[in-house]
Image (cartoon, grey):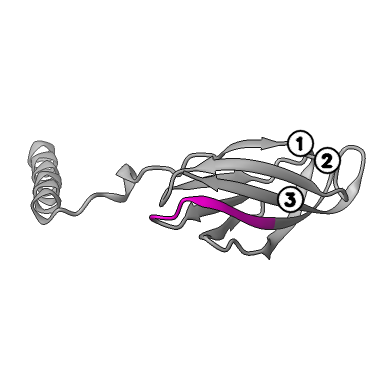
Amino acid sequence: MKTSIVTTRLSSVAALALILAVSGVTPALSAQAVPECSMSVTLADWGENSTGDIDVASGASCQIPVGIRGTVTDSSISQKPSYGKLKKIDATTFEYRAKAKYKGSDTFAIKATGKGPKASGTSVITVHATIK
């Protein structure tokens, strides 16, 4: 009896895999993770503002972590980009997507509040993007 149940379940899984393959549907598990932006930044302590630079390909996206030491308690977009889209993933991560077919520069800012080993407060991280 156990053998027939296992065979039936395996047949159902195989049938589902065949249906997905024929229909062109890709399972969510194979979705690619968005890479972290290659960033050049000097981060200050909480309560001090920072600036950074990223490079991203036209139409591509990358994630920007809030990298100030300590704990991030809240964050938001304080300046939207002009030539791309910025999306908050969670309190410590944002995703920037450069506009397709655009090459040039873009600027945006992230406001974050937190507490670190030496200070606490709100910081604005201004990011200058070079879109290639």
For label 2, the residue is 44
Q: Quadrant of residue 79?
A: bottom right
Query: Element type at marker 3?
Result: strand
Query: Mark 1 to mark 2: distance in Å?
Result: 7 Å
Q: Residues within 10 Å of mark 2 (few under 14, many from 20)?
A: some
Q: Farthest residue in the front direction?
A: 104
Please tell me the numbered disc located at residue 125: 3
Magenta segment? 101-109
- Whether the residues at callouts 1 and 3 have beta carbons within 8 Å, the answer is no
- Where residue 85 appears, x then y in whole percent? 52, 61
> Image point 14% across, 47% down: which residue?
17
**The N terminus: image quadrant:** top left
The residue positioned 11% from the left and 56% from the top of the image is: 23
Tell how many labels.
3
Residue 41 sits inside the magenta stretch: no
Q: Which residue is mark 1?
A: 42
Amino acid, disc 3 = Ile
Amino acid type for the residue under numbered disc 1: Thr
- The answer to whether the residue labelled 1 contacts the one labelled 2, judged by CB atoms less than 8 Å apart, is yes
